[in-house]
Amino acid sequence: MEPLDRSTIWPYEAGEPGAFFYQRYLHPTGVEAESVLGELDGGHALLFSSGMGAVTSVILALLEPGGRVALARDAYYGVERLFRTEFARWGVELVEFDQTGPPPERVQLVWLETPSNPLLSFPDLAATAETAHAQGARVVVDATAATPVLLRPLEHGADVVVHSATKYLGGHSDVLLGVTVSRSEDDHRRLLEFRGHAGVVAAPDPAWLLLRGLQTLTLRVERQSASALELARRLQAHPAVERVRYPGLGDAQAARYMQGGFGGLLSFDVAGGAEAARSVETSTRAIKNATSLGGVQSVLETRHRWEGDRVPESLVRLSVGLEGVEELWADLEQALHSGGSVTISP
Ligand SMILES: *Cc1c(COP(=O)(O)O)cnc(C)c1O
């Protein structure tokens, strides 16, 4: 493994700063992780202190003051909240739209999420990028749930890819990190400059853990995708489940753009509403009742508690980990029985 260098300063060479001189600008562990991430997504990668740190940096570094942004209506709720609570104060105008259709006009930035968390919608990337570029807008794709193993948005017209590396890239629920991957060197340089000014840089320790996690990324995502697809199919056939949201259940755009699987994230609506869903989330044993996604340990939760009216009260989000699929299914089945709202005949 790469050595972990925690230095915040490095000596000048013959009176001049070398590549590394102060950790806020660049440090060797971060640069090493960025070279792997850049290769994975096919662009210029930068690490940030969290996914939201990366999101904030993209908007402040690449958007002009008072700009208009088109945001996928079901993009990660933290992104919408950031616009409404922070950027609105700085005159940024937000236009929300259904990302399965064309983006609105007269915007400078189009923000997509592939697939969206937790409603799992999927845009036509190439068509959206074409429409956006025709009006001079940049396209940013939050591909946290897909990972570069299954989708490389820069190959389909995106200008910048964003990841919460806290999820699949780190993969073990022990680092908080964000990533941007830019197609153009200009955007990369602007983001690097902004990161140094603002100080939203990743520390060496989480960067090192990310490097370790990345070694098993492909294996983890393949296994999680296979298990999630199997669970999605079984949930769809279960009488206590009203609806399953998973891109692998016939989403034509996801099938067109994702390769090798549809990821480890799915949501299902429990018959019987809020109470039945709460009962399911508190009745699993192998699957922990916790937030977040992308770890080796499966977790599930009702999302209504965080996102209010954006999601149905009956929606349970499940992040599939690396446990055996039969063990996970047995756990889900007994939890669905506990809901008590549906009588299941033998
Ligand atoms: C978690 C998440 C984020 C935010 O990332 P943090 O690392 O928690 O700051 C952004 N987008 C998506 C899709 C996420 O799931």
Image (cartoon, rainbow, N blue to C red):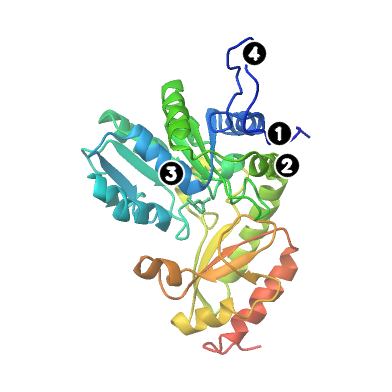
Q: Are marks 3 and 4 in contact (CB under 8 Å)?
A: no
Of the pair 264 and 226, the residue shown nearer to us: 264
Residue where numbered disc 4 is placed: 13
The amino acid sitting under disc 3 is Val
State how far apart marks 1 and 4 are (Cα).
18 Å
For discs 2 and 1, the disc positioned in front in the rendered view = 1
- Rate crowding at label 2 as few (under 14), some (14 to 19) or many (20 or more) other CA atoms within 10 Å: some
State how far apart marks 2 and 3 are (Cα).
24 Å
Q: Earlier in the sequence, mark 2 or mark 1?
A: 1
Q: Earlier in the sequence, mark 2 or mark 4?
A: 4
* Residue 198, label in figure: none
Residue where numbered disc 2 is placed: 212
Q: Would you say the beta carbon of the disc 3 residue lies within 8 angstroms of ligand 1? A: yes
**Circle 1 sits in a helix, a strand or a loop, which is it?**
loop
Which percent across, then down, holds residue 187? 42, 27
The amino acid sitting under disc 4 is Glu
State how far apart marks 3 and 4 are (Cα).
35 Å
The amino acid sitting under disc 2 is Arg
Q: Residue at x 34, y 32 (%)?
A: 130
For discs 2 and 4, the disc positioned in front in the rendered view = 4
Q: Is residue 95 visible?
A: no
In the image, is residue 50 above or below residue 331? above
Instruction: Please identify the quarter of the rendering in which residue 298 is found.
Output: bottom right
Q: Residue at x 28, y 52 (%)?
A: 96
* Residue 55, label in figure: 3
- Rate crowding at label 3 as few (under 14), some (14 to 19) or many (20 or more) other CA atoms within 10 Å: many
In the image, is residue 170 above or below residue 7? below
Q: Would you say the beta carbon of the disc 4 residue lies within 8 angstroms of ligand 1? A: no
Counting every numbered tag in the picture gives: 4
